[in-house]
Structures are given as structure tokens and as C-alpha cells.
Amino acid sequence: MASVLLPVSLLLAALLLIPELFGDFTAYQIGLYLIYGIAAQGIGFLWGKTGVLPLGQALFFGFAAYVTAITLRAETGLITELALAVAVLVAIAVFACALAALIFRGRNDSGPYFSLITLALVMIAEQIAGTATTLTGGFNGLSGFDSLGKLDPFAGFYYVIVGVTVAVSLLLFVLNRLPVNLIARAVADNEPRLQLLGFPTHIIKGAAFAFSAVIAALAGGLFASHQGIVTPTSMGFGLSAELVILTAVGGRYHVLGPLIGAVLVGWASAELRDSFPYWELLMAVAFILVVLKAPGGIAELLEAGYRRVRATKPGAPSKVIAAPPTKAVDAAGPLRFDDVHLQIGVVRILNGVSFQTPATGIVSIIGPNGAGKTSTLNTITGNLRITGGRITFGRRKIDSRPPYKALHSGIGRKLQVPSVFFSMSVSENLAIAMMANRSRLLDLLRPSTYRWRSRSLSDLLDHPSVPLKEELVEPVDHLPQGHRQFLEYAMTIAAEPQVLLLDEPCAGLSPDETALMTDLVRHYQAETGGLVIVIEHDMSIVEAISDKVLVMHLGQVLAFDTFEQVRRNPEVQAVYAGGTK
Amino acid sequence: MSALLEIDALTGGYRDTNVLFGLSARIDAGSVLGVFGRNGVGKTTLARLVQGSLLAVSGDIRISGHSVAARPAHVRRAMGIGYMPQTSMVFDDLTVRENLNLGTNRDTPERYFERFPRLAERLDQPAGTMSGGERKILAFVRTMIEDTSILVLDEPSEGVQPENIELMADCLEERAAAGAAVLLCEQNLGFLARISTGYLGLDAGKVVLEKPADEVSVAQLRSVLSL
Amino acid sequence: MSSVLFLNLAWQISTLALVALGLAIVFGKLRIMNMAHGEFVMIGAYAPVITSSLGLSGWWQLPVCLLSVGLVAFVLERAIIRHLYGRMFDSLLATWGIAILLRETVELIFGRGYQSVSPPIGGTLRLFGADYPAYRIAVIVGIVLGFAALYWWSTRSRVAVRIKAMVGNPELAEAVGIDTARLSAGAFVFGCCTAGLAGLVLAPTIRIEPMMGLDYLIRSFFALVVGGLGSLEGLGIGAGIIAGTQSVLGAVANQTYGYLAVLTLSILFLWVKPDGIRSSSR
């Protein structure tokens, strides 16, 4: 906890000293920069972690400022004002979450579209604010009201701003230590992998956006009291653009970065704007440079310098605790394809696939290239929507559902090209995997969740040939391909899915690693009594592990039988002959 | 006589980590150099350094005596180096036909359609809708028909069914016989053993075995691959 | 519908299509989220201002437009854009900075006030029983012909295929011999030049000022969202729907409602039909 309390205390101390050292007027100015900084911190959280870039935060900032101004003009008393504030914040959170979730639901790469939509929204809002004169006072805005609690912006109100700044910063520092932080970063890192681990990423993005919107609204409310006047510029494109620049230049990956950006840029702007006509130009150039050369902004440069002076010691490994059981899934039983068709454009990828696996055991799918093997797995997890037929697991229909629901139906999947969270360490990857299908919302807010370990994962890591235990703190992008395969495998089985889909798990592995992988798979199936479906090319592996073999060809099932029967099948021999590595 | 492809004390890697250290080799016209080693030893790095998508930290690469180490990839292609990468080996949004006709070719693909009929059936299909193995074959045929004298292939057999691997070996043999120099990075020892005229075994970015094919047994090759 | 309304609609749709064309190339093909797109329109619109302040005749407007826009685009591409291919979000950010840069520079040179220029072709033509400005009719015809020519070229040209290849897999494109640096620079400059041309064409009919670009950026973007990123037909359809909706609602209610309708439409499309009406897959 010291690493949270220390910077927050320093921040508090520094902010409290300002009126003492520099006088009330400077404190008033700094107060304004802090207000912008708070709004920017919300952007930093959203953008720095989930990668979603909001270009219209002034929408929430200005809306809250206007509501505050209207309320304060009505002079209804402190209690009513605070109650209304809470109501407005809730309304904003709901709106923002719904908007983002809606836009991100359909596809994973909606990021730039979302940014432009927030931009369009704020432009309309600015236009409305300028023309709805009866409500907003038009271009001249609303003024003539006292600040909240009638505090003087040049004296007492400063401390309200400090209070909010410190509170927001404290909250952000704390969030950084909690599992939600990892999940949010995972969204930006590898969204499809996170979905296959059962997390509804569009809701995560929605929640993060709502959080940033609420923070922007908080700042907007403070703004109204501080400035005593609210005009359409508070709800405008220019302010939104400025906030993003502050966040970028100050540093979007650090809690205090946006505050640094706001205070530095604000102060420099006030000093230089009149004497230096190229000030705006300079800011634009600075922004471009940050984007290209120093994406972490000033805060990151400072931290890099700090690290050079004081090298950080790696923390002591923390004790693992037993993870709670996975959420009950009422599905079990055979996986069944009923005349499944998958057509994309004119291409028939699956052309009437029907089969039923046994309730437990290992089924290998083999077939020539283009047979539809990976596509079959894609339809099971919902990465592709079938165009005909149905897929059931036990009694439950599982086709045509979004991929994040697959794990909850009991289906875990390892992809053909190892897909893990590349910006994180091995242990962070495993921590996320441990939360899959086990954690409730509250668990994401508890640091102890990081230390979850299940029996099966511990056994896997303790296995003498599995290389991951020595590499726990390594960032994943330093691992060779084969180790990433094992990591992804470990992550996939962490949630103990009833059905395990493995797409060429031995691709790129040496002969020794291949033997290890097949051992692990066999062991998993024996331990859990579940169903494993493996796509493989190497016939020696297929022979060694399969209870049944599904042969596919040209989008249809050619044969489905034991390995021996399939090997003797003349149709199979004609179309596909296997060999060993 | 200078070799078609000469690699001279090549050192290179990614960002701040080097993967290859002072590697040298030569491939004459008509020969196939089989480069092998475990995961992570530097096979792909070598392929990319030769082909140009990665620039070397030090050392030289020469085509028929001309140094190309500082040239971008499309210039090296114009000078005769063709490349089949291990991943992302086709243009997903282009049809099979467009994939094959994109560069300058010395050959028409018809010859190869006999061996790989599936490709001919899919001429107007976007390459991205084909399976992994089919894409490999498309990339392989493209590499065969380009007007190149040096072929660099990175694990072409991975994910390809065994009978097609045999056909690939035939094609490479023919190309080499017609005068090409082939740099073949592979984990599949059977495939390597079938066509290599020489071997380069790598471990931790350095050469641990360098011999002509007739002086090496498969068992020796295997020993380099395991721990 | 009265002839004037019909001709107005034709004007709005065709000019939006021309404005959005540049973004369709730069964003649709090169995957650069060019937030400065509107600023290239703006620079093109200033070309007549430049020529008249230099005392040059009207014939110089087109060369000045293409030269200024082309030069700016080329310099920016070499200095900044070329580092951003494949990094869509970074391109959004960097081009946004560039947009601010361009706006501020233009403001420093020309000031913040509105400028206006007169159309090179005066008078009206009688069409469908209505008198309509000859200039606008000439522009509409020119745009339609231009698009037809562009469409014809794109089906025959190898350049279009090479651009597609380069965008999808730049490393492999180099490996098969495509000079990606030159190709992408060319495509980017071409896209920005069409935006500048749109600005030039629109200049006699709008108020020219440094902040004018944002509106064109947003509407171009929405036209692409609705119509789909990959094709000229998509661009036409998208421009038709967006310009059409905005015109109709703008005439019936007011501008703000027009804008709101267009925004709602785009959000709906992103939710229900994320690839637009005509996406690029065959």
C-alpha cells in the first residue's frame, strides 16, 4: 500500500502548499488546470488501458457544467444540489456505457469509428448549446451564480478542487493495483483471446468509458463553480481536443501524467500565449512528436529517468492461494453437429457437416487442406456464424453466439497461432486465465485474486519439462514460439472447460516438446473426464491419443470412426494419406 | 567464382536483442542449403535478414558479388531474391490469380496446377478464405514461378499434408537443377534430408554444424535438434 | 419534387462524394485515419483566395490548388505518415496533430475571418424547368464523369491491386518487388489532392475559413461508414444517403436535426451493419 499512499500524500502536500507559497491568485489558476487535469485523468484511464480514444469528453464535462450552473442559479440548497449531482453522474454513466457497448458489440476493431462518433456528438452538442438560448443562454452562456456551498473560488473552493483531485488520483492508483487493471489492459492487448476467456469485452469498454465520462462530469461540475460562467466552449470540440493533447503530452499510462500535462501546458499557455503567436502551432508539433516518439508522454520520460537512478528491485514472490471453483456449467455430454452449413460469399466452407462425438474422450479432426477443420472450431466458439443447421452441446444449442459466451457454455479454445497477451508477463497472463469463468465482479476489485492458483495449473507448472515456471516474470514477447504454445495451453485449461478445442497444438514444436504436449493433453482429459477435440496433421500423434477420428474433406464429413477403421477406409486413403514429422 | 548467395559474418536481430551472431555461409547455383535448429535459434531471423525485411547490424550479404545488405527488400527482389515467409505468406484480400500475377514471373503457374489441382479450382477465390495449408501451397507456387535466382523459404512444409510436402520437394529439386540457389529453413528433417545438398545447423544464433549432405547422417541432425 | 430541390440534392450528393473520395483512398485503402482530411479540403478552398490576392487570373486556381495541397501532402507523408502505416490509432492521433498544425498555419497567414470568392462560370442554365447556377451544373457533370473515369481505371489498373496487396501485407509486398514507400506516398498524395480539388470546387459556394474542415471530415467519414470502405459504388451510396438525409431534414426541420439524423444513422449502421452497404469483400 505504500506505493499508493506515498505519491498521493506527496500530491496532497504539494497542492496544499501552493496557496501558501505562491498566493491565492496562482492557486486559482492552478485550480483551473487541475480541473482540466482531472478530466484528462479520466481520458488517460480509458485510453491508456483499454486503448479506446474519446474525442468528445467535453460533452460530459460541459453537460455537467451546464446542469451545475442551472442548479446553482436556482439556489436550491446544498443537499438538493449534491443529490442532483449524483443523479446526473449516474445518468451520464448509464448513457456512456450503453453508447460504447452498443458500438463495440458488433465488431472488435471499432476503435477509430467510436472516436469519430464521440467527435460528432460533441460537435452537435456545441451547436445545440449555442442555439438553445432559453436553456443554455446561447453564445453568452450562463452566469450569475455562486459556487457550490458559496465557497470563494479564490480561497476555499481551491481546497474542494484539491480534494477531488487527490480522491480521483487515489482511486486510480488503487485501481492500478487491482485485477480490473489487468483485464482492462488485456482488452487493448488481445481482445479475441480475452473473449475466448469468457469476458464480454464490449461491456468492459463500456464500463471504462462510463468511468471516464463520470470523471469528466465531476470536473465539469467543479468548473462551473470555479469559473462562475459556462459557455458553449465548455461543451465544445476545442476543449475535447485540448484534453486529449494534455493527456497525451502529460502521459496516458501514468495516473499523475494528465495532471502534469494539464498544469505544465496550462501554465505555459497562459505565460506564452500573448507573447508567442506560434503557441498553438508549437503545441500541435509537441503533440505530434509525443505520438511518434514518446507515446508515454512526460510522465514516462520522468519514470525512465527515475529508473535509471534507482533500479527497482523485483518484488518477493507472493504466496499462491487456492482459486475458487469454476462457475458451474450445466452442460455435459456429446457435441453434435446437425447438417451445419457455413457459407461466406460464394465460398461453401462447411457443406452439411453432421456428426456426434462421444460424451467424453479425445476426438481428432484430420483432413486435407481446405477441408474446413479450423472453420468447424470457429463455428463452435461463435467466431463464425453458421448459415444453416445447428450445433448442440449436451442439451444446449451453442451455435451463433458471440465468442465471449463460449467459455460459459463449457468450451475452451486454443488457437492455431499462439494467442496470448503479448504486452504482459507470463504470470500476468496466467492471472487473467485464472479469473476466467471463476471471478465475480467483486473478485476483480480484490488484490488477492492475483494469487489465485488452481490445482491443475499448479500441477502443470510444476511438471519438470514445462518451461514456464522459470519464466514467470518474463514478458511474453521474449518467449520463443514453442513456449508461447505451452502458455496458451495452460491459459486455456485454467478454466477447466468441459470441451477443449485445440487447433494444431504441436505446430512449431520440436519432437521433445510435441511429446510433452500430447502427454499433457492426455492427462487433462483423464483428469477431467471431458471432451477434447484436436486438429492434427501428424498421424503418429493422432494414433496415440484419439478415441475417435473425424475425417473432413471439402467441408463435409468423410468418415468418423476409430483410427484403425479410418486408416483402412478406402475413401480416406484415396483422399488423404498421413505421414510422420 | 563467387557464389550466387554469400552471407558474411551476419549479425542481427530485433530491437536491442541480437539473435544471430557472425553467421557466414555460401550457396552456389544449383545447391540447397538446409538450415535447421530448434525453436528460437534464429532460422526465421536469418531468412528475413537475407531477404531484407530485417536489416543487419553488421556483416554483409552478397548476390553474385554485389553487396545488398543496405538495400530494401524490393530492391533485393529485383536483384533476384524470392521469399516465402513462415506466416502471413499470401495476400488475403487478393484472389489466388492476383496473388500469382503480382510480381514478375519467369514461368506460368499452369505447370504447378497439375501437381496442386486445388489451387486451379480456386483461382478467383480470395486467398484469405482458404485454409492454412492451401495458403502455404499458394505461396509456394508463387515463389516457384517468380523470376528469381535465389529462393529463401521459411518452414514451407509446416501445416502441409505429407503428400504435398513430397511434391514441394520435387519442385524445389527441379528449380535447383535449373540453376537456383535455395536457402531452406526447416524443422521437418525428412523434408530437409530429401533435398538438401548441404546443412547449416544453428543453436543460439550460431552455427554448430556445417557440412555437405553426404557427410552427415540424419541421427547427427537429430542430435542438434534435441537438448 | 421540384426541379430546384432535385438539383440541389444532386449538388450535395456529388460534392460529398468528391470530398469523401480522398478519405476513401487514404482511410479505405491505406488504412490511415486521416483526421486532417478536412484541412486538405480547406487548403484547396483557399486556392482562389491565393490567386486573387496574387493578382493571377482564374486559370491559375487549379494548378495552385494542386500544387499547394500536393506539396503539403507530400511533405507530411515523407515526414510523418510513412511511419504510421498499419498503426491505425497512431495515425488518427498524428493526423489530428497535423490538422491542428494546418489550421493554425492557415489562420496565421489568412486570419480567422471568412473569405469568399466568386464562381468562374457565372449565370444560370435552364434545366428541368428551373433556372440553376451554371457553375453548379458544370461541377455536377464534371464529378459524374470523373467518377466514371476513375471506376473504369480501377478495374483495369494493376496499381489498384498493388495497393491492396501493400495494405494487407506490406512486408510481403516488398518481398514480391513492390516499392511500398513510393506506392503509398503516391496514393496518399493523390487522395489529399482529390480532397483539395473538392475544396476548390466548393469554394465559390461556401464561406472559406480555417475551421471549415471538421464538418467535411465528419460527413466524409459517415459516408464511408454507411456505404462501406472498399468500393466506389459504396462511396456513391454512402454519399447519397448521408447528403440526402441531411438535405431533406435540413430543409424540413433545421440543420441541427439534419446533423443529428446523420449521426444516428451512422451509429445504427455501426451497430447493425458494421461493414457498410458495400464492403470490400467480393
Image (cartoon, coloured by chain):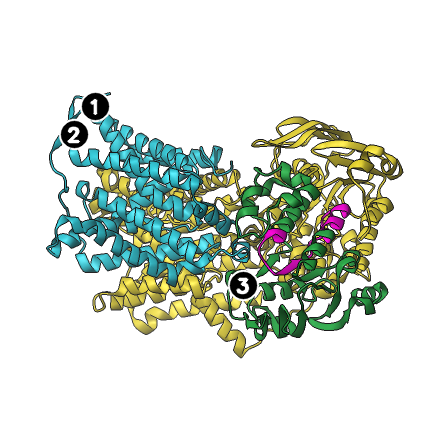
- Residue nearer the viewer, A420 or C20: C20
User: Which amino acid, by three-letter code, is at mark 1?
Assistant: Ser
Q: Quadrant of the N terminus of chain A?
A: bottom right
Give yes or no for residue B145 being in the magenta stretch. yes
Tell me the distance, in whole angstroms, between the alpha carbons under discs 3 and 1: 62 Å
Tell whether label 1 touches label 2 (CB within 8 Å): yes
For this view, does C2 lie left or right of residue A470? left
Q: Secondary structure at mark 2?
A: strand
Name the residue carrying label 3.
B79
Determine the residue positioned at 85% across, 34% down. Answer: A569
Name the residue carrying label 1.
C3
Q: Secondary structure at mark 3?
A: loop
Give yes or no for residue A63 being in the magenta stretch. no
Name the spot of residue A447 as percent of width and height, x first: 63, 57
Name the spot of residue B64 as percent of width and height, x first: 59, 70
Disc number for residue C132: 2
